[in-house]
Image (cartoon, rainbow, N blue to C red):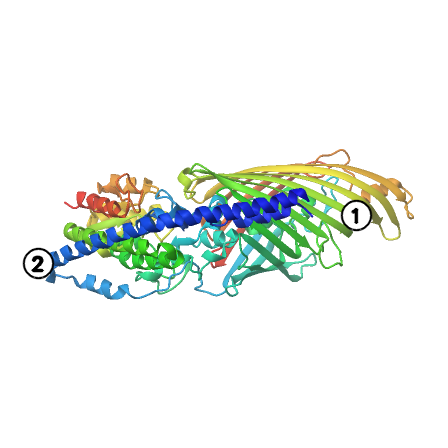
Amino acid sequence: MKIYKAGALLCIGLISAGTVLAREQADLDEIRQQMEQLRKTYEAQLNALEERLEKAEALAEKNRVELADSQVEENRVENTGGGLTSSAFNPAISVVLQGSLNSYSKNPDSYELAGFPLGGEAGLASEGLSLDETEVIASASVDQWFYAESTLAFHDNEDNEGEVEVEEAFVDPLMLPAGLGGRFGRFYSDVGYLNRFHTHAWDFRDAPLTYRAFLGKQYRDDGIRLNWTAPTDLYLMLGAETYAGKQFPAGNNSRVLGNVQTAFLKLGGDVGISHAWQGGISALLANAKDRNSGDSNFTGDSDLYIADLVYRWAPNGNPRQRNLKLQSEFFYREEDGDVTVTDNTNSALVDYDGDQKGWYAQAVYQFMPHWRTGLRYDWLDADNHLKLTDPGGFTNPNDIIEASGLDAQGHDPQRWSLMVDWSPSEFSRIRAQYDRDESRPQGTDHQLFLQYIMSLGSHGAHEF
Amino acid sequence: MRPWLPLLLCFMFTSLPLHAELHIFTCEPEWAALARELAGDKADIFTATTAQQDVHYIQARPSLIARLRRAELVVCTGADLEIGWLPLLLRRSGNASVLPGAAGNFAASSYVKMLEKPKTLDRSEGDIHPEGNPHIHLDPRNFVPIAKALSDRLASLDADHAASYRANEADFLQRWEKALQTWDQRKAGLKGMPIVVYHDAWIYLNHWLGLQQLAELEPKPGIPPTSSHLSSVLSLMQQQPARAIVYAPYQDIRAVQWLNKKTGIPGLGLPFTVGGNPQAKDLFTLFDSTLDLLLGVSE
């Protein structure tokens, strides 16, 4: 309580001291300003008179006024209403086409990440030619109070039937004071670095293994965000979100809000003119209820912590010819709860306590206009403690452990990825990528991808 | 009660502009230079880009968000020139007072006549701007209406110093008119001079000086030179030689050097904006230097 009072006093002190100083300064400024103003007005008047004289003398010669010049003079009053936004189309609509050719040396249906049950969209894309996703993005300022954006994704489900999904649909209030910002609706969480980017803005064809393992590829849900940007030259942003918890790593929650809570701090700045960086730490605390992955359901707490760092280099701050981007994220998760393992007839209960971590690091280098190449390394480690509480009809405990997907079998998944892409313009990109994937305990999977990303319509801004 | 909460709130509000200085965020060096003429020491002026950067392609760096967060006035070209980065920065900065439509948002292109408004909008034509060519600062006559409008805006945002902005405006316009007269006399020799340019960014300069732009090295706006396009420019140059190959400081000069080697036509790096060469220190010297360089190849 004492600290609280001291804080309030300090606050009042700061404000009043500031005001007094400002007032005295303002008085002085006013006098200076009036003097300056007088001087300038006289000068301007004198000069104007001089000029008039000169003009009168030169009037005879002045008649050679060019037609073009007079046209410009006439046009000068015309207001073309340029403005700083592209409201030429309202809303701004863009369509992003993504497709790929995928090839695997092992059956993609048997894909697993040792020690991490696959949740969300963590699986591999189907083999062969695939129309991955077609996104329709519409965004605009609703009025002076709100900005809204919605992304509809069209893709095929496992049975090759067309599906439409509301990937994002959110509203940002624009009138919040003092550097506050917010968002509500359905949106990608701002935890970590890569999570908030749509797949078409990723530098590789697939998600880092950490994103597959810890976030089911990417975490988005229905919720609310509040964030605050500090008024400092160093970029400092604090934010918190609360979500319904319908998606992995929560899953199946019926409560309206609060099953997933996140908090994050982001820092960033420039070093000289050619270097820029951004770093962050985040937490995502989920309350999971019947979170389904494969044959197992998890109920309990899942607490995830992420640290991320991004560095960019562009000579003279001009990324057009060459630029480099280094990016790395570290994940740590604690899970504690019960896992129910079911097959056709049996249902066993396992007490589960997991300590899991993983990281990736990548470098993407644009070595000449339109051409980039990138290298990425992924690594995961799961230390899961399982205790069978009720075999529920299973005869072999090993079957239960295997079906739970939580047994890492002493294997740490890792992967190397190498990609090259060509972007003839900002709106098109063609990419080739090779992955040497050791996610499974059973040997290496060689994966080859050929991908295209085409954007139609309005310019999407380039995120950092 | 958590003791840090009121402290945090206190920080959030006391760190708001207590000192009287107006924070101005400018997108390009030319607007920073103009703001400096009009606001003098009454403002803290930040420039988001340098003459060495291609303002079409700027990364939305965190440092820019931080600067925008504190700005009371944003001065940019508009007309979609900064579309690739500014809207995102504006949304992320959490600063409602500088959003489009607010008093703190100033788009210079709103106050001048735009040239080259495209008749059709198709991406196969390259990176075109629906509202017209946005490089309006290369015609010095455009600074007259823009200076007036910017001074109006400064006076309404910072009423305490309105008189000072007015006086600065009168002073600047008077010096500018004088400079325009000098430039008018010097530019006579440049009328009709044929040039080749790298990017179609010089249309306003051409319009002012009466330069004749024969070709661009870029096949379409924003698309880097291709060998087939360069060879067509080469054959044009052999029939109808230009005086110079004009380029800006941020452009890759390899295509310029290639054409120079083939034809002997000199490459001419113009400052393009304030800071584009050591001579172009402010708006006056920007055009002085531009004219010096052009007159150097005119005979």
Q: Position of residue A183 (x, y in %)?
A: 59, 57
Q: Judge by depth and name the residue closer to the eye, A280 or A128.
A: A280
- Per the rendering, the mark at residue A202 is none
Q: Earlier in the sequence, mark 2 or mark 1?
A: 2
The disc at residue A57 is 2
Q: Residue at x 65, y 52 (%)?
A: A241
The x, y position of residue A38, in whole percent, is 25, 53
Dot 2, how many residues are within 10 Å of its Cα: few (below 14), some (14-19), or many (20+)?
Answer: few
Point 28% across, 45% down: residue: B282
Mark 1: which amino acid? Gly
Q: Is residue B77 visible?
A: no
At label 1, counting other C-alpha atoms closer than 10 Å, the crowd grade (few under 14, some 14-19, many 20 or more) is some
Quarter of the image holding residue A387? top right
Q: CA distance from mark 2 to mark 1?
A: 91 Å
Q: Which residue is mark 1?
A: A300
Foreground mark, 2 or 1, reads 2
Letter of the chain that mark 2 sits on in the rendering = A
Q: Nearer the viewer, residue A220 or B219?
A: A220
